[in-house]
Image (tube, rainbow, N blue to C red):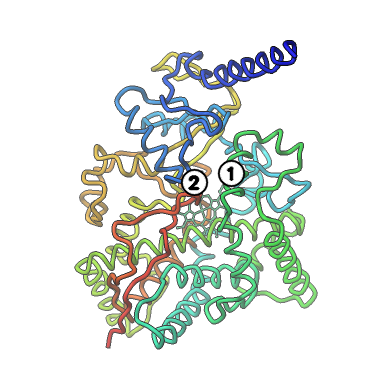
């Protein structure tokens, strides 16, 4: 009995010292590390319940600001380095990109083939894939697809018109999601998914499932970041199986049909088909899937938060509506792709929303070769995950005074010049910057323009003020959706 109790005791003591060792990784290397590290979540204690990841990281950011340009943190057991100094961020994104080219995102070609896409690929494989895909996101290609987004935004207005017959208080996140889902299903999958007309559309159901992660799935997601090799051995998949199978099947069916019938359309599917000599059908499907995965939630989130701020700031809303309506009237009632890009105030409102609510609030890079930080005389070891806290930098009062005030004037021609470089990067920066930026902005601005011409937005009883985010969501999501009072402009 004594031996048994002693062994248990020894086991507990060993575990204790093992954890202590793991959680002193950064301080042993000479880096400052965050003070509140707890087993088993490391620096993420409270995430999913009390706050979102970016809110947890923001606490660390404030704790460390002014003390060090970097801070060692722990994603579960995985040591990660959070870089908070804009000069160092610039080196990571641009000057020393060759050390930080990868994201270290988990993907598993065997158990989940479409998880291997531009977002997750690494090294030379990523470089080659990016150069093959870049041309299909050019400004010319966006212009070509403008008519599809235009048509779908008219359908958005028809759908809202119907919804208004039931109540004037509408959940606008739902409409933003259905709008972006129809845009991407139509352009990247060649499918009229009718998400705007049918709340139970299969495409929408699967799309939402990809992002409405259960707390267990969110935990699994972070676990794959923390222990990718172990997860790969276990065959863990991050994307839920049912929706990924659906997207794969849908793309391959359209692909076959278009090829057999020699059908050409001005959309992403045809552009992807043009790459069939360079990429396999599964690889092309993986990229179409990524367009949905990277474009649906981000763009609809942006649209949602723009509407939220416009509802709370009626003067800004009216100024924006005036800009849009006047320009369209001057152009014989027509809205063109060029005009959409020329709406100055719309661009300022969009940027200020991206600042206050970056849809992807944390950016990630992986250090692929030992990297010396000269000013600290410390080396970041190869294999270290790098966290770039977009949300915190964009809410830092040193760079954006009164950060909680929604003020599009920060981005007017005069003020924008004073924004410190690498403190505002909602689309990332450098060679790995968001490839779908133009499409994301096109669909968001188009949706907002059409909505503002037709409706005015204000808060209603169900609007949550101040904004609260869903703690378990890896991206920014408004808690309880976005309820607004919507009134027709006569
Ligand atoms: C408002 C909308 C969007 C936001 C805020 C956004 C944001 C981002 C961010 C922050 C990244 C990481 C960049 C980096 O690491 O430096 C990214 C990557 C990416 N995004 Fe977007 N995105 C949006 C819309 C879209 C759309 C509509 C598409 C496709 C149709 C898209 C496709 C991609 C792709 C392919 C990548 C990976 C690029 C690479 O690794 O080479 N995004 N996006």
Q: Position of residue 451 (x, y in %)?
A: 36, 76
User: Residue 249 vs residue 393: left or right?
Assistant: right
Q: Which residue is mark 2?
A: 48
Q: Is residue 114 visible?
A: yes
Q: CA distance from mark 2 to mark 1?
A: 9 Å
Sequence-wise, the earlier of marks 2 and 1 is 2
Cβ at disc 1 under 8 Å from ligand 1: no
Q: Residue furthest front?
A: 1
Instruction: Tell me if residue 386 comes above or below residue 279 in the rendering.
Output: above
Residue, x 36% and y 33% (percent of image)? 61
> In front: 279, or 391?
391
Question: For the residue carrying disc 2, how many other residues have a C-alpha within 10 Å: few (<14), some (14-19), or many (20+)?
Answer: many
Q: Residue 241: which quarter of the image? A: bottom right
Q: Please state, as top left, top right, bottom left or bottom right, where the N terminus lies in the image.
A: top right
Cβ at disc 2 under 8 Å from ligand 1: no
Residue, x 27% and y 72% (percent of image)? 458
> In front: 249, or 259?
249
Residue, x 71% and y 14% (percent of image)? 7
Question: For the residue carrying disc 1, how many other residues have a C-alpha within 10 Å: few (<14), some (14-19), or many (20+)?
Answer: some
Tell me the SS state at disc 2. Answer: loop
Instruction: Tell me if residue 490 comes above or below residue 131 in the rendering.
Output: below
Q: Position of residue 363 (x, y in %)?
A: 48, 41
Q: Residue 2: which quarter of the image? A: top right
Residue, x 46% and y 40% (percent of image)? 46
Q: Which residue is mark 1?
A: 219
Instruction: Tell me if residue 60 comes above or below residue 198 in the rendering.
Output: above
Task: Say the numbered circle drawn on residue 332.
Answer: none
Q: Position of residue 60 (x, y in %)?
A: 38, 32
Asked if labels 1 and 2 touch by Cβ distance under 8 angstroms, the answer is: yes
User: Residue 454 vs residue 208: left or right?
Assistant: left
């Amino acid at each position: 009995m004594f031996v048994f109790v002693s062994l248990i005791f020894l086991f507990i003591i060993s575990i204790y010292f093992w954890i202590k060792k793991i959680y002193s990784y950064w301080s042993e290397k000479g880096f400052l590390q965050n003070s509140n590290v707890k087993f088993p979540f490391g620096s993420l204690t409270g995430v999913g319940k009390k706050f979102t990841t970016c809110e947890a990281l923001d606490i660390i950011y404030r704790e460390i600001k002014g003390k060090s340009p970097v801070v060692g943190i722990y994603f579960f057991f995985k040591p990660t380095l959070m870089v908070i100094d804009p000069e160092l961020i610039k080196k990571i994104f641009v000057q020393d990109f060759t050390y930080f080219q990868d994201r270290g995102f988990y993907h598993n070609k065997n158990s989940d083939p479409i998880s291997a896409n531009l977002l997750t690929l690494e090294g030379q494989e990523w470089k080659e894939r990016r150069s093959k895909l870049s041309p299909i996101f050019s400004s010319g290609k966006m212009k070509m697809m403008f008519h599809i987004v235009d048509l779908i935004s008219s359908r958005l207005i028809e759908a809202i018109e119907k919804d208004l017959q039931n109540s004037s208080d509408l959940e606008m996140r739902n409409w933003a999601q259905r709008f972006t889902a129809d845009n991407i299903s139509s352009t990247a999958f060649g499918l009229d998914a009718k998400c705007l007309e049918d709340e139970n559309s299969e495409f929408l159901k699967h799309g939402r499932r990809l992002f409405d992660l259960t707390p267990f799935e969110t935990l699994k997601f972070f676990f794959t970041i923390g222990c990718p090799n172990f997860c790969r051995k276990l065959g863990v998949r991050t994307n839920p199986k049912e929706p990924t199978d659906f997207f794969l099947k849908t793309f391959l069916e359209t692909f076959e049909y278009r090829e057999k019938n020699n059908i050409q359309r001005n959309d992403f599917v045809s552009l992807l088909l043009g790459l069939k000599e360079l990429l396999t059908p599964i690889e092309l499907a993986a990229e179409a899937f990524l367009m949905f995965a990277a474009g649906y939630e981000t763009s609809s989130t942006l649209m949602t938060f723009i509407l939220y701020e416009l509802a709370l700031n009626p003067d800004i809303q009216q100024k924006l509506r005036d800009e849009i309506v006047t320009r369209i009237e001057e152009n014989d009632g027509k809205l063109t792709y060029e005009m959409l890009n020329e709406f100055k105030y719309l661009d300022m409102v969009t940027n200020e929303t991206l600042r206050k609510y970056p849809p992807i609030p944390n950016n990630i890079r992986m250090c692929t070769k030992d990297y010396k930080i000269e000013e600290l005389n410390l080396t970041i070891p190869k294999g270290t995950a790098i966290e770039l806290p977009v949300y915190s930098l964009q809410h830092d009062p040193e760079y954006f005074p009164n950060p909680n005030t929604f003020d599009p004037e920060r981005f007017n021609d005069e003020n924008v010049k004073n924004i410190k470089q690498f403190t505002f990067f909602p689309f990332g920066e450098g060679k790995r910057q968001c490839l779908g930026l133009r499409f994301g902005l096109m669909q968001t601005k188009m949706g907002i323009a059409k909505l503002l011409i037709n409706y005015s937005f204000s808060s209603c009883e169900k609007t949550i003020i101040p904004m609260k985010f869903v703690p378990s969501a890896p991206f920014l999501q408004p808690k309880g959706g976005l309820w607004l009072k919507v009134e027709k402009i006569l």
